[in-house]
Image (cartoon, rainbow, N blue to C red):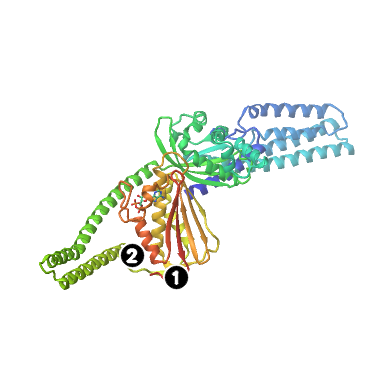
Amino acid sequence: MREASRNTAAIARKFSDIALLKIVQPCSQSGIARSTRPYGDNSLSRFSPVAAALIAVAVFLLDTLTTFDIAIAVLYVVVVLLSLNFANQTQLVAIGAGCMGLTLLSFLLSHGLELPAESIGRCFVSLAATGITTFLAFRVKAAIGILEDSEQRYRSIFLATGVGILQMDFTGLKTAIDKYKTDGVQSIEDIENLDSGFVRKALRSIKLINANNTALNMFNMPDIDRLGTLLPALVSSEVERKVWNFLASIWAGNHSYEAETVIRTSQGRQLIFLYNVAVPPDRPTLDMVLISIMDVTARREAENELDVARSQLAHVTRIATLGELTVSIAHELNQPLAAVVTNGGAGLRWLRRDVPDLKKVESSIEGMVADATRASEVIKHLRGLSVKSSPNPVNVNLNEVAEETVALLQREIDVNQVTSRFDLADHLPEIHGDRVQLQQVVLNLILNAIQAMAHAPGGRRELLVKSLSEEAAVVLRIQDTGPGIPPEVRDRLFDPFYTTKPDGMGMGLSICRSILTAHGGSINATSEPGAGTTFEVTIPFNKEVG
Ligand code: ADP
């Protein structure tokens, strides 16, 4: 798409050139796809040869038959200029030469062999004016020829390219945004707060000027006018958030904006479009904006199928892992537990004797304590296994870890229509830790946040990743606008195997806490039901990983 956006920018620049050409040559057609005739081939140019011939005859008669003291032959320049509409370069030279010949002929016919100095002067002025005009007309014609070739080339690209291209006029939208700016509104978010219906008005204000065939086929529309009328309705209310993002880009004065969006066609088909909006830098009023579109529905569907297959596989693997884990826990714990039972039974038997043997009871209880301690060691060991066993401590910048992780999860973020935002501290001190383990922590927290928001119907889906440095530690906050954590879940949040998700394993937060404890840090959650959740990770700097 970066390639496509470069092409769009080139085409956008070309469109500007062509618009310039239309000022030089106002008789030509407007719009590229709609234009099928070459420049100059229009009603005016059809009458131009007749008009030019009539003017030439009139000038000749006036020049020959009247005795005005003015250089009437200068009017031949009108004939040459009119010829620009129909003659090619050779014909222009011939017409110019013809006019100069007629000037000389009139001079000879009206003065014979008398050659008064004033008349010679007037004749010379007329010849010079006609000659210079012919030369300039010749140059203009050559320039027009080059631009015509160029337009032809770009028209072919425009029509034949596999990317859908829409040429739009955003003047109304730009005026509305500028008005808000003049009224002192500070940002697009402020407009959103003042007028939530602004997006719809914005969509209605933009005009479709032109579209290539690929675009028409993509939207399944018979012609440009129908597409122009239906375009605002194709943007469903679910994707309005994307439009706000786009408006923020316009507000910031950016010349390019790229995003993916879901469009529902008039036949009800849901399509995923990757689009790029290019604003030529020399069109500040946004009267010509080019949108290039690629239909990535098939590609995304294939990716989704792959995702489903992958998550099914992950689920199966999790169940298998859980099964294995259960077997190994059972196996490891069985032995000390069996010993506890045996020692307990023996102790009871010594106690129930007619004369209890307290020495033996004591040793049985000591055995039980030792076995129970062994069982607890086993549990600790198993927990240790779930965290990568050999930490690889390096200097880590948590900002980088956060940015990398968000980039890694960008698809999840887009698919779930979440807007991600960073508020990262400048010059954040580095911490000493295991980069992969810390990435595992951030990944788990962001995934949980996305999943929490994805399952909350309606509402804003915003993920904020914030970092800051405190006296001796760095802090990373992952904040979501999900449903929050209910009180009954709060107390069990970090318990191993505690999950509220149908396919969850409940190990994520428990592992996060183990990793952070190993880094000398901590994790805690603050949440208000209905108002989102914030997980806060604190890691001291200058601390070795344990
Ligand atoms: P899992 O994701 O497999 O359920 P975790 O240990 O990562 O395991 O999470 C445990 C539980 O904590 C989740 O099932 C969910 O109920 C709750 N939880 C975690 N993060 C959030 C969040 N951002 N918002 C709401 N609930 C959350």
Residue 388, numbered label: 2
Q: Quadrant of the C terminus?
A: bottom left
- In the rendered structure, the answer to whether residue 360 lies left or right of residue 544 reads left
Res 161 seen here? no
Residue 543, numbered label: 1
Q: Where does the image place residue 364, in percent across and percent down from the top left?
A: 17, 69
Does residue 372 sit above or below 216 in this rendering? below
Q: Where does the image place residue 529, in percent across and percent down from the top left?
A: 43, 45
Instruction: Indicate the amino acid at tag 1.
Output: Lys
Residue 199 in which image quadrant: top right
Instruction: Indicate the amino acid at tag 2.
Output: Lys
Viewer-nearest of labels 2 and 1? 1
Residue 206 in which image quadrant: top right
Going 47% across and 71% down the picture, which residue do you hit? 542
Q: Is mark 2 within 8 Å of ligand 1?
A: no
Q: Circle 1: is it few (<14), some (14-19), or many (20+) Cα within 10 Å? A: some
Does residue 204 sit above or below 324 in this rendering? above
Residue 491, numbered label: none
Q: Circle 2: is it few (<14), some (14-19), or many (20+) Cα within 10 Å? A: few
Q: Where does the image place residue 383, in percent across and percent down from the top left?
A: 30, 63
Q: Secondary structure at mark 2?
A: loop
Give the spatial CA distance, label 2 vs label 1: 18 Å
Res 310 seen here? yes
- Residue toward you, 274 or 48: 274
- In the rendered structure, the answer to whether residue 360 lies left or right of residue 54 reads left
